[in-house]
Every structure is written in C-alpha cells, then in structure tokens.
Amino acid sequence: MGMKAYIVRRVLLFIPTLLGVTLLIFAILQFFTPEERASAYIRGTPKNPDVIYRVIEKYHLDAPLHIQYYFWITRVLSGDLGIAKSAGNIPVSVALLKGIPATFELVIFSIPSIIFLGIYLGIKSAVNRDKASDHIIRIFSIIGWSLPTFWSALILISIFYGGLGWVSAGRLSNEAYGVVTSPNFIRYTRINTIDGILNGQLWITIDALKHIVLPVINLTIISVALIVRVMRSSMLEELSKGYILTAKAKGLSNDVVINKHAKRNALIPVVTISGVLTAGLLTGVVITETVFNYKGIGYFAAHAALQMDIPSVLGFALFVGLVYSVANLIVDITYAYIDPRIRVE
Amino acid sequence: MSQIVRLKDIVVRFYTYEGVVKALEKVNLFVKKGETLGLVGETGCGKTMTGLSIFNLIPSPGRIEGGEVLFRTKEGRIKNLLSLDEAGLQRIRGAEISMIFQEPSASLNPVYTIGDQVSEVFLTHREKALLKNTIKKIDEELQESKGELLKRFILRFEKNIYERIMRNKDPLLIRILNKIPLIRRYRRRLEAEAKKQAISLLRDLGIPDPERVADMYPYELSGGMQQRAVIAMALACNPVLLVADEPTTSLDVTIQARILELIRELKRRFDTTVLFITHDLGVIAEMCDRVAVMYAGNVVEIADVKEIFRNPLHPYTKALMESIPQPGKEYKTIRGVVPNLINPPSGCRFHPRCPQAVEICAEKRPELLEIRKDHFVACHLYDGEER
Amino acid sequence: MKSNSRWSELKKSMSPTIAELKFTVKRIRESPLSIMGMAIIMFFAAIAILAPILAPPVNENPYIMPHDGWKRVPKPPSPKHIFGTTSGQYDVFYGCIWGTRTAFYVGFEVVGISLLIGIVIGSLSGYYGGIVDEIMMRFTDIIYAFPGLILAMALVVAFGRSLESVLLALVLVSWPTYTRVIRGEVLKVKQTDYVEVAKAIGCSDFRIITRHILPNAIYPVLIMASLNIGSVVLTAAALSFLGLGAGESFADWGQLISNSRDYIMGTAANPLAYWHTWLIPGLFIFMFVLGWNLLGDAFRDILDPTIRRR
C-alpha cells in the first residue's frame, strides 16, 4: 500500500540527484582547457596539434556550456569516458569494467563482517554499559576509527606478508594467476573465488580467499567502529524506552527483549548510517587496494591520480558518485521497510 | 480476605551523577484479593516506583536496596518476588501480575503490529495450550490429506517438533532449529494460533474490527485504542494482580471515562485485583475500595476510600483533600515545595510543610500504624509518643 | 525600562544553556577517555610550539625538509637521523616534528573556513528559507552524493598538486555538513519566543541573526567542528599518501610515507628493511587523530541528551 507509493516517490527523487552528480563532474572538467580535455580522448600523446583541434570540434569542447553538457552526457551515457593513459591507453570505461569484479569481491566479503561484527559489538557494549566489556569495545572502536587506512594496511602487510611470508600481495599467487589467465580457464564473472568453483579448480578459490583475507580485515577494522558507535547509542536509547518496560512486564526473557524488541528499533539508525558506511568502504577500497596491490577500481583510481590522469580520476569519481547514490536509494527503501512510520510521511 | 501482595519496607535508591535519590524509603503496603487499591500522591512521590518494585523492574540507575514483596501465586504459594531468580520472575510477570502504563503510545513497540504484541504474551506464557491446539489441528489435516505425500511428510515433521517442544525434549535442538530461517517457519502455526486468541481477546475488549486492528501498527491507532491494546496484553493471561499506572492520564476526557469503565468491567469479569496508581482524587473516588496516600517516597496513610474522604488523619492527606477544587469552597494549596529526594528532610519527610509539625517530627521517622480498624497512618500526632 | 525585562527574559532562556555548559565541562573533566585525548592533543601542541627547538630549520621556509644527499634508497635510523631518512634522504624526524605544525594548520584552516561558510550560508538559508534555501540544500545534496576523499581526489587533480589545492578541496567537501547543522539549529531557534519578541520590537534581520539566533544555535556546531579536525587530518594524510599532497620536500606526515612508497615493501631478503619510513610518520598521524577522536567521543556521549544521564 503506502510502501509502493513511497518507493515510486523516492525513485523519482533519484533523477535530480543523478543530474546533480553529472553536473558536478562536468563542472570540475571546466577547470581544464578545451585542449587538455581533448587530449583525454586521444590515445598516447598526439604529435600533430591538428589532431587536438579536430577532437575539440568533433566533441564540441568549446561550445557554450549547455551544449557542451548535452554532448558530454550523451557520450558518458554511451560509455565513452575518455582514454585512461595511466592504464595503458585503454578506454576508462573498459578499465573500470575490468576492475569492478575485483572490488566487488572485496566489498562483498567485507560488508557482512562489518555489519554483523558492528551490530554484535554495539549491542554487547550497550547491554554491558559502563562495564569492562563496554570500555574495551569502545576503546577498540575509537582506535579503529582513528587508524589511517594505509597505515593499518601497511602494518598488516608487513606482519603477515613480509614477516610471516603468508602470501604475496596481489589478488592471486603467480601460479594461480598463470592458470586464471590461461585460455582454458573461463573467467565467467572475473570474481576469482567464484570462477575457481565454476571451473572446478577449488585451489584457485582458496588461493583467492587467502589473498582477500587481509584487505577485508583492513576494511573491517576501519569501518566497524561506525556501526558499533551508532548501534551502541541507538540501543541505549531504545533500552530506556517505555515499550521495553512493557515487554519486561509481559514476562519476556532478557534475550527476547534485547534481540527482538530493542534490536529491531535500534537497527533503524544503523540502516540510515549504512549509506555513510558505503562511502567509507568506497574510500577505503582506494587505499586498501593500492597498498595490497589488489587490482580493482580503487587501485586503478589511485594510480591514475598519481599520474594526474584526468579522465580516469573523473570517470572513477562519476562512477563512485552513481554507486553511492544508488546505495543511498537502497538504504532509504530498506529504512521504510523496517520502520512502518516512514511510509506514511 | 486474604492478601494478594504485601510490600514490606521497600527501599529504592537511584544512583545519579547529581547524587543518590532516595526514591522509596521503607514503603509498606498490602493489596487484598479482589479489591481495588488506589495509590495516590503528587508527581514524583514514588507511586510508579512502588508499582514497578512489585515486578522487580526498577529501571537503572535505580536499585531496590531492601524489603520484601510477598506475592501469593495462583497456586496459593507465597513467594518473595525480590529474592526470586530471573526465570522465576519471568514466569510471574505478565502471567500472574501485569501492568498498564501511563503512555500507551510509548508502551507499544512501534515496529511490531498490535497482533504480534498481544500474541507474544500467549506465546510466552501459554505455550502448552497453544501446542495442544496446534497438534490437534495438524492431526485433522493429516486425516484430510490422504495421498498427498509431500504435505503429509511436512505435517509429520512439524508434529514431531511440536511434540518434542511439548515434552521439553532436546531443548538445544529446538533452539538451533529456531535460528534457521526456513525451518523456523514451523512456528507459524503456533503464531497463527496465538494470533487467533489475540484477536478474540481484542474483540472481548470492545475493539471494533479486531482482525484488521491486529494487523495495524501502533501509530495507526488512536490513544484510546492503543490503551485498549495495552490492556489486552496485560489481561491476556488472566493475571491475579493488575497494576494500572495512571492508565487514563494521557487520554482525552471522554475516552478516560470509557477506559475506566472498561477496567472496572474487566476486573469483575476476570476477577482481578487492581492496584490503581493515580494523582487524581476524582478517579480514586470512582474506582477504588481502599486508598494509600504517598508522600515523598513514603506511604503516609491507608484507609477505606470513604473513610479517607470523610475522615483524613494525616496532615498531608488533609491538605490534599482541601486542595480539591469544589464549588463554593475556598481552594487551598499546600504550602512549601515538594522536597528534593537527594537530601530529603529528616524525620517525617512532610514536616517542613506540615502545619501541625512538632519537634519530634524533624527527628524521628513515624511508623505506619493501625490507628483504627483498617486505618493506617504514619504520623507522630497519632502514635502516642507525643500525646 | 521595558527592554530590561526582555533582557532578563533572554537571560532566563539562556540560563539552562549555561547550566548545560557547566555540566558538560564537569563531565569532560570526569571522563578518563577525554582526559587521555586532551593529553595527546596537548602533547602534539607542545611539539608544534617547540618545533624550532626540537628540529632547527635549515631552509628559509622551515616547512621545506632538509635532505642529506639525493640517494633514492631510504636509510635506517642512525645517531645523525634518529628516525632515519626517506627516499631522497629527507630526515624523517624533521618531517614528523614540522609535520605536526602542518597537521594543526591543515586541521584548523579547513575546519575554520568550512565552518565560516557553513555559518553564513546555513544561517541565511535557515532564516530566510524559500528559494535560496532550496538551492543551497540541493547544492549540499550534490556534494553529499560523493564520498569525501574521492571528490577531494578529483578536485586536487583538477586544481593541480599543491597544499593550497588540498586545503581548498577539503573545504569544498566539508562545508555542507556545517551548513546543514547550522541551518537545522537556526530553524529550531527561529521558532522560540525570544526571537519572536525580537522581531516584534523591530530588530533588524542582521541583528536578530547575529545577536539572538547564532549565539544559541552555534554551540553544538562549534564543538562538532573542532572535533572534526582529526578526520580532516586523516583525509589530508590519505590524499598525501596517494601522491596528491603538498610535494616531496614538504614537511607533512602523509607526504613522508608517500616519498618512500616504492620502498615500503622492503627488500626481498628483508621485507621490513624500511619500516621506519612508514611506521613512524603513521604513528604520528594515528596518535593525532586518536587524540581528537577520544575527545570527540566523550563529547558526543555527553552532548547526546538521550544517553546522557545515567
């Protein structure tokens, strides 16, 4: 009933957001001269300046802004984001597509551990308020919150890869990489853990898992604090509410009161904050992938930034903006699903 | 008449940053079977805390630091609720004693439907009866479904689980099963059964269209309807004692009268004893058989409702009676202010405001004594120490 | 005088705020975590103040790190360079000491400027409402549609690599937060009686905003902002690490690590050969941010009215 109308309204609101995201990237592009922008569409460095002028004319790079935006957005929609010079002169969209499965794999493994650990610790902390376990959880979450992503990654990598010689950095060991890139290994999804199973080569999956554990731990350490903090404070708030007393007076066990009554309500702010969590993950991915030499889109973006590769960085930013907006859309809909009161508003 | 519950020297303290709040100081009280005892006093005098102490549910940072709550269970055994373990308390809460709170919208969980919240009481306290009914139903379905192999298999499986729960066999296995989403669906039958009972209870309480209301969320209901749902939860298991904490204060005047009428009717029908907490002397006169007057964490006077209105003994009760606005009479207020319970006055806590205070009032705490038959007062004017 | 009674009215309406403030200060002093945070920040403040004594500058601009030769391979700690050197032979100790100043500078500047923008736009937006408000809020929405670091990355690439670019990019991504909070507070305060009274006696809009609304709305935002210094420094360090910092020779913690990024993994024989190039500057960043976050966490708990009093 109200749910459908709410979703439709929320999806309609998504359109201006999309427009805004593209407009902002377009605005940043205007910092560059038409010549600089034109070279983004040319492989390598052109020897003849005429090439650049031809591109400017063809792509309307010196036209009035609204016309420029029109041509730019049509090109973006058709998947043309320019050439990524930092990634061997392949189109930016191709570079992104190549990196997405790896990053997706990393994020998909991180999210459950962040959310479940965060909720569990948050509840534990709130229920044992001002006791030792509460203090320990809080101190650890503040430490996680304060760790520079690259520093914690460097510490992990030196201890486990350098010190203990566990595995080497990257997504796969050399041996596994050789197999994966060989012609008789079919890369269905480009997600190594899944492709390993699909090709019936379980050792590839295990090898991929070994390589993904530390990056996942790193992302978890830096992001879990957010969930713990929100869960703790919302849990404390819910536990002080009237319906908790009613539930206890009904004769419900503490377990039911906490895990059924308080938790469901306390999760509402956590759902809201999971948009911010997505942002944290998207940023964390850039640095974690760079340090672990894990070739996803974050790695691609960091290398592009180091070489001031304009179309790659902006293409990445545009992509992340879209992903983040979609994530926020999903968050809002989930929110309405959990909290019946939102739908009527 | 026998006593259902007896509070003996209950002491409740709250440990706050500002200091220790001495919320209840040796509260003595008893409720007789079948009566309605009114508990009256100003805001913050400890009425609600007295009610909650019966449940051993003082919210933190509060603690019960002394006393006993002696409760006569349905089986006729007398238990001290303050020395009972948590599991024992949970068996009594909601089943033998239950509570209605002041703010119905706050006492309902906003994210569960009314039906969920009412049937939860049945699922908690009436599991055996629900199981019996469900097993009977499964048997019927088994009879009907001859030949449908898969369905019969599922039904058998469910019946097996229900019987195990019934006999309390393999509690660990059941607990694990309850954690697995798809298998947990077997509970739906149990939940459906509980919901059926919840709907019939809602109908009993005069809620129109109970099937629809059961699927509604609290915010979709009016205050009066919400309070009916709360009352339904409280009365679901036919409790011996109902503690009603200002159940009508937050409602509109017209609805107040209806809720009061409902409580009175239900009390008759369910044969429940009621402890009625209010600050409204009008409601007391209308609802109660006996009255206990509280002041700053102490019970100062207990008597029959007629006796207390006709012949109040404690100076505070007298002042309270005089502060009722009446046509043609001068309206009096009680001088002074409600004391701060972090540093309460010594001796009788009322003495700084008492027009009849004497020296001893500031020094010694008066005991609650039976001055006349069934008339208890805690005041040095009557305990014979002075005169 | 009539206005006198209004003043006492105003004072009365402010008195809970003052009581609140006293209570907050008391709680801060009682919380061990916030004391720890305070101590850490004080320690860094001392380093920043004593920087010229601890690490006497060699160049005219003290923020330019001196370097002992041009060799690419970092050198481990020695009596001459107690924290060792980075790739390019920049002294890590010098960089860490003067980097403390950079951290305070970046933190204060970014937070201060974004706060100023937030106060001006937020209060105008909240007070006047209407179309201005609508446009401003859509504008903040757009910036909110990007994770901060990634937008900052794109902006620094657009502006060109320099400390100024980093500062500007960080300001651009952080002002919407303050604008939103200020606007929310202004909307709340706007409806109070004393603002109505001020309007009724004919105070100018400017006077109402600066004298009546802001003093009441600004308090939580100021605290929030000052505690954001930690996360600003963290983002700036990440940018430096990604090579979008102030430049190789600039005394900045993130920059120090970035300088030796090719050597971080050590040598094949000894993977930990160059630990000092990242562990020491990283520790400075971590402790600095930790100090602010400890303080921030204590404040958040104390200011959160729902979980405040136990």
Image: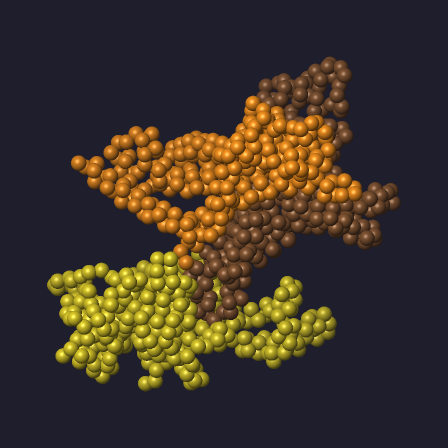
Chain colours: A brown, B yellow, C orange
Residue at point 66%, 50% (across, down): A217
Answer with left or right where residue C56 lies relative to residue B257: right
In the image, residue B220 above or below residue C205: below
Image x and y of residue B360, in percent: 18, 72
Image x and y of residue C242, in percent: 65, 34
Q: Quadrant of residue A17?
A: top right
Quadrant, the N terminus of chain B: bottom left
Is A1 or A319 nearer to us in this picture? A319
Image x and y of residue C220, in percent: 41, 42
The residue positioned farthest toward the right in the image shown: A184
Question: Does the image show residue B343?
Answer: yes
Count of numbered circles on the image: 0
Image x and y of residue C226, in percent: 46, 39
Answer with left or right where residue B327 lies relative to residue B258: left
The residue positioned farthest toward the front in the image shown: C79
Q: Quadrant of residue B167?
A: bottom right
In the image, residue B36 above or below residue C71: below
Is B195 or B17 nearer to us in this picture? B17
Residue at point 60%, 23% (across, down): A31
Question: Does the image show residue A266?
Answer: no
Answer with left or right where residue A279 lies relative to residue A89: left
Is B194 or C280 nearer to us in this picture? C280
Quadrant, the C terminus of chain B: bottom left
Residue at point 66%, 22% (across, down): A37
Residue at point 50%, 61% (across, down): A131
Is C91 or C214 nearer to us in this picture? C91
